[in-house]
Amino acid sequence: MPIRTARRILPAKGGLPLYLGLGTMGLAGVLEWPIAVGVGVGYAVLRNPPPGAETPNAKGAAA
């Protein structure tokens, strides 16, 4: 179950190395864990916006 959820949420390309790096830096103490989690969540949200959400370019393209 957790693996299926992770595959659905995490981006297919380019995301896994980022998440592994953030996790490693969080465990090693290079980054505080809340910062690592925040960066990872922010990256996931930016890569997978919710359905119906406007992108910044959508307004400029319509004008």
Image: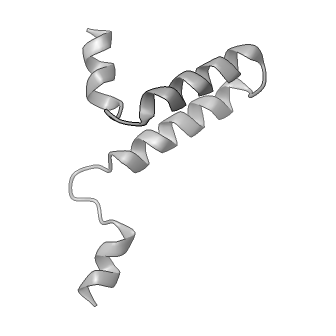
Assign the N terminus to one quadrant of the image: top left
Horizontal and vertical percent for residue 34? 66, 29
Describe the colour scheme in one phrase.
one colour
The residue depicted at 42 percent of the width and 39 percent of the height is 44
Assign the C terminus to one quadrant of the image: bottom left
Residue 8's place in the image compared with 27, above or below, is below
The residue depicted at 64 percent of the width and 18 percent of the height is 24
Residue farthest toward the left in the current orientation of the protein: 52
Q: Quadrant of residue 7?
A: top left
Horizontal and vertical percent for residue 61? 28, 82
Residue 48's place in the image compared with 2, above or below, is below
Of the pair 53 and 43, the residue shown nearer to us: 43
Q: Quadrant of residue 35?
A: top right
Q: Quadrant of residue 20?
A: top right
Figure label count: 0
The residue depicted at 25 percent of the width and 16 percent of the height is 4
43 left or right of 55 in image: right
28 left or right of 8 in image: right
Horizontal and vertical percent for residue 60? 34, 83
